[in-house]
Amino acid sequence: MTGIKKAVTLASRIWPRYSTYQYQNLDQKSWFSQPVGPSSCMRHSPHTKPSGCWPQVQCGFGRVGSHFWGFELQSVVPDMVTLGKPIGNGFPMGAVVMTPKLAQGFSNGMEYFNTCGGCTGAAAAGVAVLEAIEEDQLQQHAHEVGTYLVQQLEGLQKDYPCIGHVRGMGLFVGFELVLPESQKPAPGTAKFVKEAMKARRVLVSTDGHHNQVIKIKPPMCFDKSNVDTLIANLIDLLKPGVPAAVQEVDRAYDPNKKSTRIQNTTWQAMPANGVQGV
């Protein structure tokens, strides 16, 4: 339990709203059935009322730079937060943080258990991740490098009109690809860019309602020299122009046809020029 106690102490410094949580020597069952934070954390919060379940798999742990958790950008206190892959930096683990009211639902007379819950190896991995984020100042690093990345991408818009909106915070950035003459979503171009960048050993992914967005969410150690490499490869790729066959695919694409739309709201939630959502 020493590892868990240390993890709670570290998390209290990084997530001050839960700093009044008192560690108790809980057995495995009660660890999952009791609230992670005190009810007073809601009263002490400067934010509004709780709001649903917020996964922090992609945008938590300092990735957005200005805040440690992505949901803080929305000025809410969630009822529940799920934490996944980044919490162990490769070690398979996850965590759930919830209000006392929700946690009470597990205390219903039925025994709740988790086969791998309370694993000391997982606790040690989680502690190591929190220590690295704090000691290496990765949140500030994400803010500085992410700001530089957005500036570089915005600088390409004039010369490459197929680049539409550029959005993001920290190392969670996306840019839209469109048909220059109509500003219509260009999912074919996005797929072309994704695959061509992969061939150049630069990994990005697609996102958005129409899969027209290139999403960039690199490791937290990603630095400005890596940004320069990414931008140089993107320029080299776009300079000859998007292949005619790809443009024809995009011209034939109907963004209003529901059967062709991909329901993914990550892009819509990303800030544009510092404003949440558009």
Image (cartoon, helix red, strand yellow):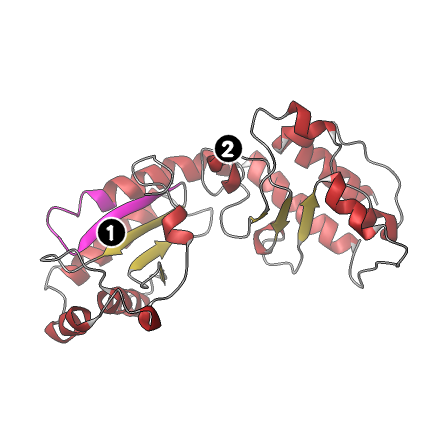
164 to the left or right of 70 = left
Q: What element carries label 2?
A: loop
Residue at 34% in and 34% down = 274
Up/down of 123 relative to 182, above or below: above
Mark 1 or 2, closer to the camera: 2
Residue at 86% in and 48% down = 30
Up/down of 60 relative to 48, above or below: below
Q: Name the residue under label 1.
A: 231
Q: What element carries label 1?
A: helix
Residue numbers of the magenta segment: 153-169
Residue at 16% in and 47% down = 157
Q: Where is residue 73 in the image (x, y as percent from the top left)?
A: 47, 36
Nearest to the observer: residue 150 or residue 90: 150
Give the residue type at disc 1.
Answer: Ile
Disc 1 crowd, CA 10 A, few/some/many (<14, 14-19, 20+): some
Residue 161 on the magenta span: yes
Which mark identifies residue 55? Answer: none
Q: Are marks 1 and 2 in contact (CB under 8 Å)?
A: no
Q: Where is residue 91 in the image (x, y as percent from the top left)?
A: 64, 58
The quadrant of the rendering that contains the N terminus is top right
Which mark identifies residue 75? Answer: 2
